[in-house]
């Protein structure tokens, strides 16, 4: 006879587990004796009942319920689920020391449950590079552990994972601060093994800028030296833009670094710029290089700004130059008449050397796309309305996609033709938000929901290669002080029709896709909910199977600080 049991919603389920965890702790365990996890995981219970919902799967775990309490058996079911469909395996924390037991503490204490959930085979890549605070670290999804910070990889650096699983960094350090602004910058090519340990260091560049002693400059605390790092489309070349004040002039240029050998393959000089009048000092930032869609040419963008001493008025602009991606000398200034008036959020080249600039306004409002063909002609500006809470964009080929996460709207602009198209996704239903599978409930407990970040980085990713979909992170902002994640939305790349929605397991703030397009990775914030035990707090990474949106893995206790993916694509 089969017992029919009414299903329990996941919120209730998660609360039950938390309530039990708050008052339960493991008894002392001899090192020679099998642990509770040994007893559970190594002996999969037979499936003897087919009751409705997830409780139907507990029929074979009756003995565990008697021996380990109701709450523990709930967790055991998750961990030891039979493999009729891809099962959920759990990787526990390292075993406790066999030394003397710690003295008992008064009152209940939260227990750290397994850090990793696996639903089938381990996804590839199983190690991911993350930005953590002011540096980088490697997360191992097999163990749920975050490695130490990569030595010398600061927030100004740019680290890339290579095809062989090792890492290369164009690492930037700055020091010699005067009045809050550095005077010295050093650039090194650093290499790390697959676990993030430093293996080699090569010096690339060393720059020292002079102070601007004028009163107006002291009020603004301008930079004395600046460095910016970008890469070629195939990441075989690194571009190091530099700028420094040298007396009455700003000097700057670009180094092209062979990422395999560490050799500076080419040096490109940029025109000197005056430091400006005494009452309106001019500041010049390091140039950034954006390689065109065809990989042959590159657009160099060098921002400048100044502040009027008397009025406080702010002025900005960007110089542009065109050069071959291989780094031969730049041409004359390019497309200056189409530069942004207030500021440039992004810029690049399409096929055929059509330059585009994404301009923002100091008064807010929509973004503007300006375009400049090689022949110097004038093309109409394109207004983009996707500037709402958390708005973000991604470039793929000759198209740029804009995503507004609160309204769940996506816009595509063809940078060559100027054609625009739009799509939107319906609001998630209650079922979408909670998720139909127990892995969602346990995942949200291990990787707790909290205040979603307004800025998603990145919040939208176009499938790599010939992939036909776009992935984007949503935000619900019923409470503007504490917005929450609404998960991953999937759109057709060409029609912008919604194809699906994947429920969140945490408040997602960053998105990435495996290089082969098989898996989608979402990073969750570490900020805890008020009802989450301290032992379970931490940033998280959830991996979805791109074929059907099922959760393949969750690493739920990575770091007390927030994490972001270092790149949209994970090789």
Image (cartoon, rainbow, N blue to C red):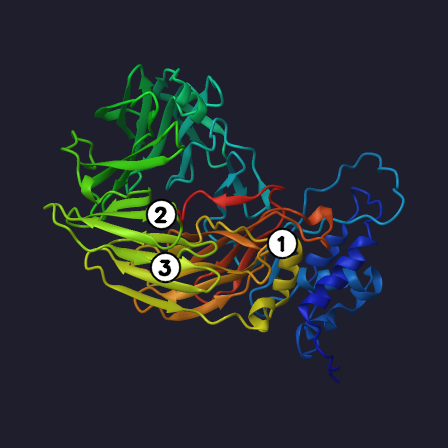
The x, y position of residue 90, in whole percent, is 64, 54
Residue 347 at least partly seen: yes
| Label 3 secondary element | loop
Q: Residues within 10 Å of mark 3 (few under 14, many from 20)?
A: some
Q: In which quarter of the image is the N terminus?
A: bottom right
Q: Name the residue under label 2.
A: 361
Q: Give x and y (percent) for residue 366.
A: 36, 55
> Which circle marks residue 385 in the picture?
3
| 403 is higher (above) or lower (below) than 155 | below
Percent x, y of residue 359: 31, 47
Question: Which residue of the protein is positioned furthest toward the left in this rendering?
Answer: 375
Q: Is residue 539 left or right of residue 373?
A: right
Q: In the image, what residue occupies the spot 30% across and 48% down?
A: 358
Mark-to-mark CA distance, 3 and 2: 12 Å
Contact between labelled residues 3 and 1, with CB atoms less than 8 Å apart: no
> What secondary structure is found at the residue carrying circle 2?
loop
At x 39%, y 15%, the residue is 213
Q: Is the residue 219 above or below the residue 47 in the image?
A: above
Give the farthest residue toward the bottom: 1
Q: Residue 257's quadrant in the figure?
A: top left
Q: Which of marks 3 and 2 is nearer the N terminus?
A: 2
Cα–Cα gap, marks 1 and 3: 28 Å
The part of the image, by quadrant, that contains residue 412 is bottom left
Q: Any mark on residue 450, and which?
A: 1
- Which SS class for mark 1? loop
Q: Position of residue 107 (x, y in %)?
A: 88, 48
- Say if 166 sits above or below 515 in the image: above
């Amino acid at each position: 006879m089969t017992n029919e049991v009414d299903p329990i919603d996941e919120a209730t389920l998660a609360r039950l587990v938390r309530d039990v965890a708050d008052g339960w702790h493991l008894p002392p365990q001899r090192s020679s004796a099998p642990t509770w996890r040994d007893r559970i995981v190594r002996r999969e219970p037979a499936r003897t009942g087919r009751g409705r919902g997830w409780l139907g799967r507990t029929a074979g775990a009756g003995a565990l319920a008697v021996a380990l309490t109701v709450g523990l058996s709930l967790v055991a079911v998750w961990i030891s689920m039979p493999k009729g469909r891809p099962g959920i395996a759990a990787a526990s924390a390292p075993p406790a020391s066999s030394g003397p037991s710690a003295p008992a503490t008064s009152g209940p204490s939260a227990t750290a449950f397994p850090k990793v959930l696996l639903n089938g085979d381990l996804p590839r890549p199983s190690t991911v590079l993350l930005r953590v605070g002011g540096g980088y670290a490697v997360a191992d999804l097999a163990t749920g552990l975050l490695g130490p910070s990569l030595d010398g990889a600061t927030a100004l650096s740019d680290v890339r994972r290579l095809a062989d699983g090792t890492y290369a960094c164009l690492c930037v350090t700055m020091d010699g601060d005067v009045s809050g602004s550095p005077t010295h910058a050093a650039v090194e090519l650093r290499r790390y093994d697959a676990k993030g340990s430093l293996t080699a260091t090569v010096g690339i560049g060393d720059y020292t800028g002079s102070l601007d002693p004028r009163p107006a400059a002291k009020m603004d605390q301008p930079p004395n030296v600046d460095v910016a790092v970008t890469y070629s489309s195939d990441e075989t070349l690194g571009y190091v833009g530099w700028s420094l004040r040298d007396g009455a002039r700003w000097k700057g240029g670009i180094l092209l670094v062979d990422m395999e050998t560490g050799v500076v393959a080419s040096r490109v000089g940029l025109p000197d710029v005056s430091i400006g009048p005494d009452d309106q000092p001019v500041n010049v930032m390091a140039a950034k290089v954006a390689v065109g869609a065809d990989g042959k040419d590159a657009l160099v963008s060098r921002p400048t700004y100044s502040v009027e001493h008397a009025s406080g008025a702010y002025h900005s602009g960007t110089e542009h130059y065109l050069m071959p991606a291989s780094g031969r000398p730049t041409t004359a200034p390019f497309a200056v008449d189409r530069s942004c008036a207030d500021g440039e959020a992004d810029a690049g080249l399409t096929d055929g050397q059509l330059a585009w600039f994404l301009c923002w306004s100091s008064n807010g409002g929509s973004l503007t796309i300006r375009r400049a063909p090689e022949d110097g002609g004038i093309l109409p500006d394109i207004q983009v309305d996707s500037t709402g809470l958390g708005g973000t964009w991604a470039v793929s080929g000759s198209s740029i996609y804009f995503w507004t996460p609160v309204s769940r709207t996506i816009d595509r602009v063809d940078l060559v033709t100027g054609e625009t198209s739009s799509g939107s996704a319906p609001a998630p239903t209650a079922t979408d938000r909670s998720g139909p599978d127990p892995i969602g409930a346990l995942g949200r407990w291990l990787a707790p929901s909290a205040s979603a970040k307004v800025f998603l980085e990145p919040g939208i990713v176009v499938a790599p290669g010939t992939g036909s979909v776009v992935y984007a992170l949503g935000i619900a902002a019923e409470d503007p002080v504490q917005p929450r994640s609404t998960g991953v939305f999937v759109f057709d790349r060409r029609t912008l029709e919604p194809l699906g929605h994947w429920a969140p397991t945490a408040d997602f703030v960053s998105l990435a896709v495996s290089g082969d397009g098989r898996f989608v990775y979402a990073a969750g914030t570490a900020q805890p909910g008020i009802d989450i035990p301290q032992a379970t707090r931490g940033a998280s990474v959830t991996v979805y199977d791109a074929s059907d949106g099922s959760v393949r893995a969750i690493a739920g206790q990575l770091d007390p600080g927030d994490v972001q993916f270092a790149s949209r694509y994970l090789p």
